[in-house]
Image: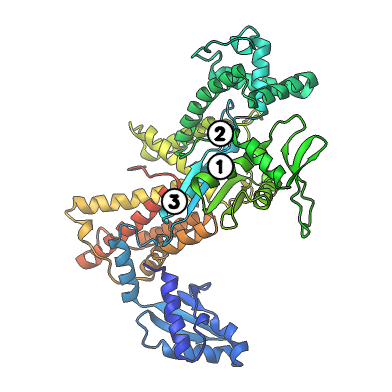
């Protein structure tokens, strides 16, 4: 079914044409003065220059053609030339009835589905996930789900950092600590042990120690760089250690992403494209794009219109080692060959902006992707503490993601117990569900590109623009419907009728915007628009709820209409939070 605004605009367009004006001026928008009207059209203001006529006179001409409209109950021309519009009750009721009867809630699916790859993980192996990984995971997961909800074929890729200096550092530190391990014997030709010579906890201690030492000891750093090069050349012992690191680390990463309800279709990393790099670089040399500069191989990507310096894109360092730019380019080539995507979307910290300018330009210039493939960088802002600096532990360190999740769950558990007045056996499970909503909604309700303050107290509140408030609204509706059924009612047999009050019509109008809310959020890659929509919907429902005694209503037909509307609103909220990446408990 078409979006509500499209249907209203079609009606307006026809009226403009009947009045002798171009139909393109007939575009409906939500009213910026809901106290005066529900929708408005400003087309007459734009038409005055073409038709040399006062806008209000144009608006009056159009309003006259809408006097018998089946869509608008009121079309009034007001100074200086706006059209104030209200919908007919029958039209709105019919629209919502069609939504209610549709399993898809009348959300339009793509007529020509596109293939998208969303790159939204990016953790380095051998290191625990921390709060810095949160935004990529949450925003990327939402955009993946949103694309699928609207009918596109969306592939999520974690894109692990699994082949860079951090591995060389671990190998070097391990060699210092356990030099007798067979992995370091260049003459060893047998099979390597199945069990790793370290635990995950060991890795999490080894890497920071090695990283710190490399900053103070230049010889140690050079040794780590050499180890990285030898790994990339697949030295047997080093490659076997890398496989052990991957086995332990990826299992831990999957468990932590599971706690966030984030999943990936592809668990690929930099290592997966290493064999493609020589072929790719040789081709760039052959085609004249890559040239040598002080031993390194680079591609110029600056353009005449640049207002700031854009450095060349480096493919290989002077020692022959590849870089992030190299593996990102090889990954683009790999994705193009295997999936032929219409778009590759990167959800990464906005401070990586220059990196992606270089990579995208190099990919275009060298023909790694056709012009028909979009390359898009959604750079997100920083998650900060109340002091305005990146979110940290009380001790000042970087907070592990699992610690944040546990802390939020515990905070929600306390509030749920206080709310219920008892420690129900399902309170802990409910706390985990509501806690996840607090984290995800708290993040997604902010514009992705902007920094924001992660306020635990505010995000876990049952009031205001928060995940728990949205879930509390869903649970409240479920409670009303359950009591209706307990009294012998059947929600499935109820049908939406005409609005009996302004509060009810406001709720109905908001429910009718769902199709538009999803599509605009997807087009703009803006999950916060979904959050804004369901927050307004929840507010409209709660205003309606406080003004009407639904279960005590004696008019059976009126009560049935209200129940049907509640069923629809609940379905919309449940569908929307699934797109956002969390679910609702049975009760709170």
75 sits to left or right of 174: left
Label 1, label 2: how far apart the Cα atoms are: 9 Å
**Mark 2 secondary-structure assignment:** helix
Name which of mark 3 and mark 2 comes first in the sequence: 3
Residue 331 is situated, as x and y percent measured from the top left of the image, at: 58, 41
Q: Which residue is mark 1?
A: 334
Q: Residues within 10 Å of mark 2 (few under 14, many from 20)?
A: some
**Mark 1 secondary-structure assignment:** helix
Question: Eyeballing the image, is 493 above or below 14?
Answer: above
At 56% across and 42% down in the image, what residue appears?
334
Which of the 4 image quarters holds residue 214?
A: top right
Residue 480 is situated, as x and y percent measured from the top left of the image, at: 29, 53
Q: Which residue is mark 3?
A: 153
556 sits to left or right of 386: left
Direction top: furthest residue: 180
Between 100 and 146, the one nearer to me in the picture: 146
Q: Residues within 10 Å of mark 3 (few under 14, many from 20)?
A: some
At 45% across and 79% down in the image, what residue appears?
85
Between 329 and 79, the one nearer to me in the picture: 329
Name which of mark 1 and mark 2 comes first in the sequence: 2
Tally the numbered discs: 3
Direction left: furthest residue: 488
Q: Which residue is mark 2?
A: 272
Q: Nearer the viewer, mark 1 or mark 3?
A: 1
Label 3, label 2: how far apart the Cα atoms are: 23 Å
Direction front: furthest residue: 286
Question: Eyeballing the image, is 240 above or below 357?
Answer: above
Q: Is residue 80 visible?
A: no
Question: Eyeballing the image, is 117 above or below 240?
Answer: below
Q: Is residue 312 visible?
A: yes
Which of the 4 image quarters holds residue 373?
A: bottom right
């Amino acid at each position: 079914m078409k979006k509500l605004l499209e249907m209203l605009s079609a009606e307006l367009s026809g009226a403009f044409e009947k009045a002798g004006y171009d139909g393109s001026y007939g575009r409906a928008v939500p009213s910026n003065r809901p106290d005066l009207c529900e929708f408005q059209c400003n087309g007459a203001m734009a038409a005055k220059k073409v038709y040399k006529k006062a806008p209000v006179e144009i608006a009056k001409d159009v309003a006259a053609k809408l006097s018998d409209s089946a869509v608008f109950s009121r079309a009034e021309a007001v100074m200086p030339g706006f059209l104030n519009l209200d919908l007919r009750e029958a039209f709105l009721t019919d629209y919502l009835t069609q939504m209610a009867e549709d399993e898809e809630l009348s959300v339009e699916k793509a007529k020509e589905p596109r293939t998208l790859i969303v790159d939204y993980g990016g953790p380095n192996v051998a290191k625990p996930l921390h709060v810095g990984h949160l935004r990529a995971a949450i925003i990327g997961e939402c955009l993946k789900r949103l694309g699928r909800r609207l009918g596109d074929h969306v592939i999520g890729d974690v894109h692990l950092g699994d082949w860079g200096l951090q591995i060389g550092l671990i190998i070097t530190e391990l060699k210092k600590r356990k030099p007798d391990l067979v992995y370091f014997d260049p003459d060893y030709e047998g099979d390597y042990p199945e069990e790793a010579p370290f635990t995950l906890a060991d890795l999490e201690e080894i890497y920071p120690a090695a990283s710190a030492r490399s900053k103070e000891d230049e010889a140690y750093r050079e040794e780590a760089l050499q180890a990285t090069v030898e790994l990339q050349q697949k030295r047997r012992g080093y490659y076997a250690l890398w496989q052990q690191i991957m086995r332990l680390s990826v299992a831990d990463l999957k468990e932590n992403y599971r706690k966030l309800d984030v999943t990936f279709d592809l668990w690929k990393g930099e290592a997966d494209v290493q064999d493609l790099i020589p072929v790719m670089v040789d081709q760039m040399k052959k085609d004249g794009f890559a040239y040598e500069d002080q031993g390194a191989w680079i591609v110029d990507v600056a353009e005449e219109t640049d207002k700031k310096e854009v450095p060349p894109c480096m493919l290989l360092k002077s020692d022959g080692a590849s870089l992030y730019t190299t593996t990102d380019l090889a990954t683009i080539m790999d994705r193009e060959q295997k999936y032929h995507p219409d778009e590759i979307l990167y959800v990464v910290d906005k401070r990586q902006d220059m990196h992606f300018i270089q990579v995208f330009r190099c990919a275009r210039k060298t023909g790694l992707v056709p012009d028909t493939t979009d390359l898009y960088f959604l750079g997100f802002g920083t998650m900060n503490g109340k002091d305005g600096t990146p979110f940290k532990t009380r001790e000042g360190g970087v907070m592990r993601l699992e610690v944040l999740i546990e802390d939020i769950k515990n905070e929600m558990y306390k509030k749920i117990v206080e709310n219920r007045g008892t420690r129900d056996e399902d309170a802990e499970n409910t706390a985990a569900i509501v806690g996840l909503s607090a984290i995800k909604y708290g993040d997604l309700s902010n514009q992705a590109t902007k920094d924001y303050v992660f306020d635990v107290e505010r995000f876990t509140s049952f009031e205001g623009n928060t995940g728990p408030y949205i879930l509390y609204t869903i649970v409240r509706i479920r409670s009303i419907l359950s009591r209706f059924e307990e009294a012998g009612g059947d929600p499935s047999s109820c049908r939406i009728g005409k609005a009996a009050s302004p509060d009810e019509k406001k709720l109905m109008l908001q429910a009718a915007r769902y199709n538009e809310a999803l599509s605009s959020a997807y087009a703009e890659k803006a999950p916060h628009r979904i959050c804004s929509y369901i927050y307004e919907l929840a507010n409209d429902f709660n205003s309606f709820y406080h003004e009407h005694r639904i279960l005590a209503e004696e008019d059976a037909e009126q009560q049935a209409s209200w129940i049907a509307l509640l069923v629809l609103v609940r379905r919309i909220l449940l569908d929307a939070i699934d797109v956002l990446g969390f679910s609702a408990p049975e009760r709170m």
